[in-house]
Image (cartoon, helix red, strand yellow):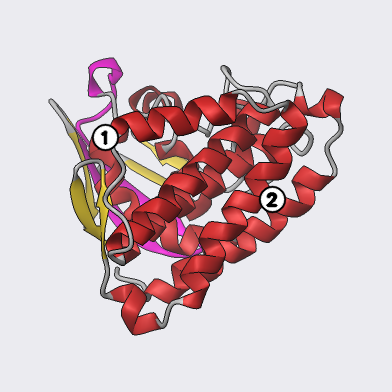
């Protein structure tokens, strides 16, 4: 399902505002505490979000023709700059950088924004895909922060509505079928919003619109849960209610999507 480009910008703004409020509440001790990401404390996650926002802004500027696409050396220098900041600086500057990217998107007319092709890892992608990928980074890593103090926290509905329809493009990258021992085909039925999807796992993995027969393996779950499953964030301690399984175990699904 395609969504208007402006929907992604609105979701980015909502997610940013929540992140800004959260970041402003953190003290030095909290910034040093471990996030859901094993290798990063809270400040490290915020640093990642801040550097990602700067890179996204430069990608947008490149699409607008005001600069050349970033070279790898430039990205590495940017990451080094962020790594050298104090934890407090990482938190404060991440909010500023993220707001700068979202504001730049908001300032563009819808037709102008929607018509852009943005450089992304050596390719050019449509603006909606580019914004969606930034929303993934922003929303999932924000969840990595919030869940430390609020274990039942969920991705917001406006984010889920957009991200669930991106999963077909993400699964081939996110899945690790070499670790998977479950059924080769599993119907994935979501609610809030409703989707009928077919997961196929063999040498690779695919998630496509469609379903299986009445007796075939089936996972019924909230769309929010499916998004977090694909991104490796549906461990037993953070699994929502309402999941129904038939012919497959949730641990099999978790083994297919270990996270990244």
Q: Which residue is mark 1?
A: 173
Percent across and percent down for residue 154 are 64, 48
Is residue 183 among what the camera can see?
yes
From the viewer's side, name the closer residue of 29 and 153.
29
Residue in the picture at 59% in, 65% down: 13
Which residue is nearer to you in this view: 215 or 170?
Answer: 170
Instruction: Name the image quarter holding the C terminus.
Output: top left
Q: Mark number for residue 19?
A: 2
| Residue 128, x across and y down, in percent | 33, 65
What is the crowding at mark 1: few (fewer than 14 residues within 10 Å), some, or many (at least 20)? some
Place residue 254 in its image quadrant. top left
Most foreground residue, 27 or 260: 27
Residue plotted at (62% across, 44% down): 241
Mark 1 element type: helix
Q: How many marks?
A: 2
Residue 195 magenta: yes
Front in this rendered view, residue 51 or 35: 51
Start-end of magenta stretch: 177-200
């Amino acid at each position: 399902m395609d969504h208007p480009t402006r929907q992604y910008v609105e979701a980015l703004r909502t997610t940013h505002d929540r992140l800004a409020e959260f970041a402003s509440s953190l003290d030095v001790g909290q910034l040093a505490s471990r996030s859901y990401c094993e290798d990063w404390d809270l400040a490290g996650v915020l640093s990642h979000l801040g550097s990602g926002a700067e890179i996204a802004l430069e990608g947008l500027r490149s699409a607008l023709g005001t600069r050349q696409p970033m070279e790898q050396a430039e990205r590495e220098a940017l990451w080094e700059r962020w790594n050298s900041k104090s934890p407090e600086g990482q938190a404060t500057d991440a909010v500023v950088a993220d707001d700068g990217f979202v504001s730049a998107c908001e300032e563009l007319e819808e037709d102008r924004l929607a018509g852009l092709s943005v450089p992304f890892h050596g390719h050019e992608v449509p603006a909606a895909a580019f914004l969606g990928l930034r929303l993934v980074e922003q929303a999932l890593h924000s969840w990595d922060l919030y869940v430390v103090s609020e274990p039942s926290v969920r991705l917001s509905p406006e984010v889920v509505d957009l991200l669930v329809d991106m999963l077909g493009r993400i699964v081939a990258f996110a899945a690790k079928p070499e670790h998977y021992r479950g059924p080769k085909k599993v119907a994935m039925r979501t609610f809030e919003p409703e989707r009928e999807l077919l997961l196929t796992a063999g040498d690779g993995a695919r998630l496509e619109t469609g379903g299986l027969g009445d007796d075939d393996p089936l996972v019924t779950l909230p769309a929010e849960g499916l998004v977090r499953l694909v991104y490796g964030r549906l461990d037993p301690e953070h699994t929502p209610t309402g999941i129904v399984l038939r012919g497959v175990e949730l641990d099999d699904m978790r083994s297919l999507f270990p996270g990244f």
